[in-house]
Image (cartoon, helix red, strand yellow):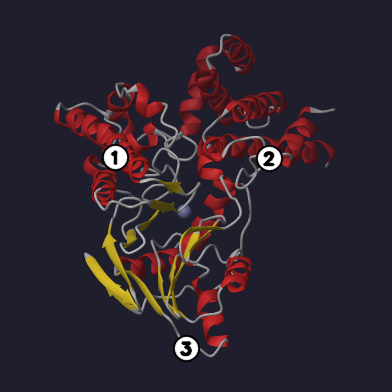
Amino acid sequence: MTIKDRLNDHLNSIVLQYGQHQGLTKEEAAYFYIGPHEEVAPGVWHFYSLAHSITFICEDRLMQVDANIGFKAPEVIEQMRKITKLPIDSIAITHGHIDHCLGTWHYVRDNLDRGFGHPKVIAHKNLRDRIDKNKMMEGHRSGTDKKQFQFDMKLKEEFVYANVEFMDRLEVTVKDQSFLIVYGNGHTEDSIWVYNPERKVLCCGDLFQWTAPNVGNPYKMQRFALENAQALEEMAVQGADVLCPGHGPVIYGKEEIKTCLLTSARYLRTIQDHVVACLNKGMILEETVNTLEMPEDLLNSKWLPPLYGHPTFIAKGIFKRYAGYYSGRPAELFPPDYADIAKEMVALAGGSAPILERVHHLMEKGQVELACQLSEWLIESDPDNQEAWEQYGMLFKERAEKEFNMQARGTWNQAVRRAVSNLERLEAQATA
Ligand SMILES: [Zn+2]
């Protein structure tokens, strides 16, 4: 079997972890848990999917929180309609990520088809800008989804703009039930949370999502750690008995929920305070990230495994927010082309062969980051070197196989894809 075939086998065997957690408890599956729907309180149904949604029965009307990703919404609506055929009065959208908002179109359609009219669609006023941004950045979205989630997805649904928009907080009554809807910011600039005090059910969207907070994403626009922490703290004092998160299992019990929310807030504040202190001392990005020390209890928290978010991503996001993207190294403000740096380094080393040898040696010593860096220089300086691409592909394949964080793993797998396509290019050149 050639190395290219082994790399292709690896790419073909990638498992998207969502809902694929055989043998793990709900808590171990964490962010990736998808299970059968649950009645979490009398007349309140939580539906698990790529992102979750919640249906509140309010006498003879429904309050819906979130609407799933577009291609999953029809099957969730079908489950929901087996439980209740009542009209949807309102749909509250916790934020404009497509796994929460794109299915809105299907819920509106379902209501219209049943002759119930267009429901109210409630969201923060920034959802409008977020939808416009989604449309403007569609090419980026699909490219990033390929890197992060390993799949190609065409959007078939129309985005639905809210017809009830608010700024800070909103109180909504649907028949005998009230809903406190509060702007949370943080995960996105349009994040909200929804609390139903009569049944003590809290829907937090992705302000908490059973992973180290996804605030400071290497592929995505600015997020807001401090505001996310504040939103978690405000939710913690509501006294909820049930917490329905945007991802991961439902959490029950007043004390458990309070501890979970405050632990998540402390996680974010620890990193926020560290970065702010470093910036005020004049430290550069690398020093800031490398001196971050997370307390053991936060690193090992069952609620916050670094499956999706990661302390380093969060620290970099906070740094960029307050201080821009400058690395702090003057040579890098207007840097030379990466390929030129690579050629210099490889020439200084005496050519490609010693680098191939050194990469191998570093891997044997377990210095994977350094090995990847040298390998990256090698393929940039010597892009027609088959052995260099084979080494590069195998290096990142091994790194992906050991990686816990989904976004890092997606990045390593993208490097494997790049190796395969260059090996194919070289094969085609050889036979031309
Ligand atoms: Zn989500």
Q: CA distance from mark 1 to mark 2?
A: 35 Å
Mark 1 vs 3, N-terminal side: 3
For residue 198, which numbered disc appears in the image? none
Looking at this view, is 1 or 269 the one in front? 269
Residue that sits furthest to the bottom in the current view: 115
Amino acid carrying mark 1 in the image = Leu
Estimate the spatial distance between the alpha carbons at disc 2 and disc 3, rounded to whole Å.
43 Å
Q: Quadrant of residue 176?
A: bottom left
State the residue position of label 2: 14
Task: Give the mark, 2 or 3, whose residue is nearer the N terminus.
Answer: 2
User: Which quadrant, please, contains the C terminus?
Assistant: top right
Q: Residue furthest front?
A: 42
Q: Position of residue 148 (x, y in %)?
A: 54, 45
The image shows residue 412 at horizontal and vertical percentages of 58, 34
Q: Disc 1 vs disc 2: Cβ atoms closer than 8 Å?
A: no
Q: Secondary structure at mark 3?
A: loop
Kindly state the secondary structure of the residue where label 2 is placed.
Answer: loop
Q: Name the kind of residue labelled 3 in the image.
A: Gly
Residue 370 against residue 198 in the figure, above or below: above
The amino acid beneath tag 2 is Ile
Specify whether residue 167 is in view.
Answer: no
Query: Dot 3: within a 10 Å radius of its alpha carbon, few (fewer than 14), some, or many (20 or more) residues?
Result: some
Residue 202: % across, % down? 36, 56
Q: Nearer the viewer, mark 1 or mark 2?
A: 1
Tell me what residue is drawn at x 50 percent, y 47 percent.
Answer: 249
Q: Is residue 368 left or right of residue 203?
A: right
Identify the residue under disc 1: 262
- Tell me what residue is drawn at x 39 percent, y 27 percent: 299
